[in-house]
Amino acid sequence: MKPRCKPDWTIEDSAALYGIRHWGGGHFDLSARGELTIKARFPTGEVAIPLPEIVAGAAARGHEFPLLLRIENLLDARLALLNNSFAAAIAAAGYRGTYQGVFPVKVNQQCQVIEEISRFGAAYGHGLEAGSKAELLLALAKLHDGALLICNGYKDHEFIDLGLWAGKLGHRCFFVIESPSELPLILDRSARLGIKPLIGVRIKVSAEVGGLWTETSGDRSSFGLSTAQLVTVVDQLRRCDMLDCLQLLHCHLGSQIPDLSDIRSGVREASRFYAELASEGVPLQYLDLGGGLAVDYLGNQSKHSHSRNYDTADYCRCIVETVAQTLDRQKIPHPTLVTESGRATVAHTTMLLFNILDVLQFAPLALPDRCPDTAPALVARQYQLHQSVTADELTATYTEALANRDRLRERFRSGEISLRQRSLAENLFLSIARQVAEKLDQQPQIPAELSDLHQNLADIYYGNFSVFQSLPDTWAIDQVYPVLPIQRLDEAPTRDAIISDLTCDCDGKLDCFIVNGNEQQTLPLHPLRDDEDYILGVFLMGAYQETLGDLHNLFGDTNVLSVRINENGSFDFSKELSGDSIADVLSMVEYHPTTLLEDLRNKAESAVRRGAISLAERQQILQEFSARLRGSTYYRS
Ligand SMILES: *Cc1c(COP(=O)(O)O)cnc(C)c1O
């Protein structure tokens, strides 16, 4: 690793440090001026737009930080990648079937995302997967004609009626049976409406899968039929002469599966179920393998739960070849392959951008040239240590300084030393710790006693965002996202930092980062400059984040901007959504803005009556209050 103090730092050093080429999937790059760029591909070539330009365009339109940016071109590119990779794998393997994907709505339900998937996906026949009535309603309205619509999850008769009507409208709408009790309901509603259903069955595979989401498959999963239940459902359909409705076999191994060999085992088992059912005379035509295609958040192509040891092409080849091999043994015709890839389709599309409001450094504020004569002996000893840190005694020096600091704090508590003496002692300790850390950087090995030192001395950068609103998975499941500055990447980042959000919660922070391909607890950043925004981006956060967020400390939805990059190098804001105002979030917890204003008016009026404020001041206070109600929940720098 290159020392970060090098004066000849280049954008390539930043690219390696932040792993941009590894997690970026080819969608991100750096400009010669050190800006992070977004790349869009066109038949005539590639266009790269610097992110700071998009931010400037947003600011000129009145959108303040934090900004959620959605790049439509990236969504198109991911859909194209998935569909083209399956097409290539199918051609290469001589597979006698096609691929038809569906997007699981739960992964990102935002209208702009669903509309874009429906619009761009039409060319590939890319459909939607719905897991609730609300999702089915939006899918039904937005999906292009003729596409697949897969209904998973618990279903009541209203859900089923909607799905049956979807079939009348020309969608191939499958009810995937997750539990045996659903079948009688589907048959009953279908008879009442006189519409034949398309039915799928969801099986539980026993092949074990690694990753964070393993409980979505296996014997104890709450979803899917056991083998015995599957056989019962098939027999019931046969008895009532409806076996021709059963055309799809579904399984979902889990989300974010890091190891390709786990996917292969699961697909092989699902294919065996398919082959067995087909050879029993079930007229299956679709094999739906669910989600699981992982995103390499870490950018290190590993079996780590936030990474993956394969790429999209490997994934498609694995599925196509495994299905073909398994079915060919029993001479079963190849089905249409379906996957429900959510994460891998939308993660790259969305990024969160926020500015840094302030930085807290753990460094001495002021130190006298010599130790005051009045200083207690222990403080004098700290002064001596601070003046004599040498490379060969780092552990001993630090251990003693730490013990001295703790003893001095104890003496403060018991009243033996004064506020000023404690202040000097704390400054001295920080000076010693800093000197030790600097000398440590030049040593090949870090002693175990000093392994936390860098982290303990890291700066805290205060970001204008809320983890709970925008990145809930970072605290809920320790999800790691790429985080980096979007400017000054031609400059060495000389500070080590953790990032704190605006909430008053100790979980409201980002303290796990990928640096040079390894997880670490601090992120290299640049020192702030006066009068210049320092903007950080959190990337790959388009999946699962947007509707999980909550109103911790009443920080509301951020501004959301959709951007389309044009072939001529320009870009448009194709959709602008303002975030929640303070009045919006207060209404969500049942405060009515008009009543609040009335309450305040009464308070101000009685202050006027008491003579505490003038009438002009009353007006000023009320104006300020109502302006803030209409304003953003986040901060201005
Ligand atoms: C959540 C879910 C998916 C999406 O999985 P990804 O790993 O995000 O692709 C697909 N199918 C079902 C049934 C799901 O529950």
Image: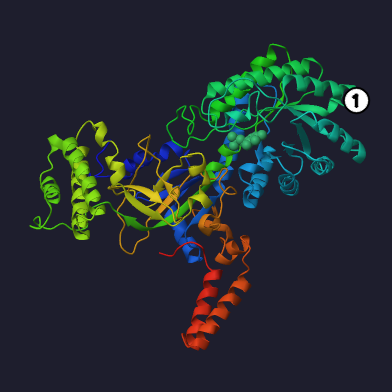
Judging depth in this view, the residue of 420 and 453 nearest the camera is: 420
Residue at which label 1 appears: 240
Which residue is pictured at 46% across the width and 58% down the height?
55
| Left or right for 323, reference 351 | right
- Give coordinates of residue 364: x percent, y percent: 21, 54
For ligand 1, the image quadrant comes to top right
- Give coordinates of residue 93: x percent, y percent: 61, 20
Give the SS element for disc 1. loop
Q: For the residue marked with disc 1, what is the amino acid? A: Cys
Query: Compared to 225, does 604 lie above or below?
Result: below
Quadrant of the snapshot with the N terminus: top left
- Number of on-image labels: 1
Judging depth in this view, the residue of 616 and 40 nearest the camera is: 616
Query: Compared to 207, does 444 lie above or below?
Result: below
Which residue is pictured at 75% across the width and 46% down the height?
140
Q: Is residue 341 visible?
A: no
